[in-house]
Amino acid sequence: MALELFSKLGQLDTSKVTEADVEAMTEAQRSAFFECIQDCQATENAEARERAAVILAREKMIAQASALEAHTKANPAQTRIEAMREVQAAQNGTPLNKAAPKSHPKIAHKSVRVAYEKSELELTEARAELYAAQADVRRLRPISADALSKFMATFRQKSTMEVHREVIAAQQAERIRRVKDGLPAEPVKPEPVHQWPISKALASNGGNKRPYSTPRR
């Protein structure tokens, strides 16, 4: 019995498995089949969660960078000169004249800072979700692979001799078909055409080289 459980893209697809296929299984095969389906589906759900978490984390990183740029422009960090002047003024006991703010801090300065802090928090949460999703994928992949191996092991495996006989039978059937079609039993290999000396040298694989011999004294 050959069951196709996965699509060409490697995703779980049981649409080709019929009820007759399930009924034809033994009790052990049926139990291993349902366990395999459950574990593979859990792995695919975890992988989908991981993909969504990657996209979300990237979006939050872009938003955080934009919010940081706005926060830096609205609330520039204190320069080294400003810090030195502030220290000197404190040491000398003289008041430090600061420039009047361009806008009210509660309106412009605080809003961008709050937006930046919010973007930082959202980015942290997105990264936590990404790490959790990646951990689930790493945990579930071996489980689904083991379940698939157990399900495949419930079926009789072909021996090396059986596989060898099938290959020989297929080759013999191909020869018979070619003879019936009026073709040679074995396909004729075309003569290689060497357009460049390097191609001829590569085709000969060093066969034209003279054997190595020690010079006579």
Image (cartoon, rainbow, N blue to C red):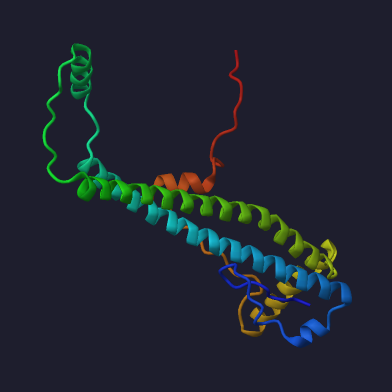
Where residue 89 sits, quadrant-wise, is top left
In the depicted structure, whether residue 95 falls above or below residue 71 = above
Q: Is residue 3 visible?
A: yes
**Foreground of the two, 198 or 157:** 157
Q: Quadrant of residue 28?
A: bottom right
Q: Position of residue 151 (x, y in %)?
A: 79, 67
Q: Is residue 72 left or right of residue 13?
A: left
Looking at the figure, which quarter contains the C terminus?
Answer: top right
In front here: 91 or 24? 91
Corner quadrant of residue 136 = bottom right
The residue at the far right in this view is: 27
Number of dots carrying numbers? 0
- In-image side of 76 versus 97 (left or right): right
Quadrant of the image containing the N terminus = bottom right
Q: Residue 146 in the image: state x and y as whole percent.
A: 75, 59
Identified at 73% across, 74% down, the residue is 170
Is residue 166 visible to us here?
A: no
Residue placed at 61% from the left, 56% from the top?
Answer: 137
- In-image side of 211 versus 56 (left or right): right
Q: In this picture, is 179 found above or below 132?
A: below
Question: Which residue shows up at 76% across the image and 63% down it?
Answer: 147
Q: Looking at the picture, how far across and down is residue 81, in whole percent?
A: 18, 21
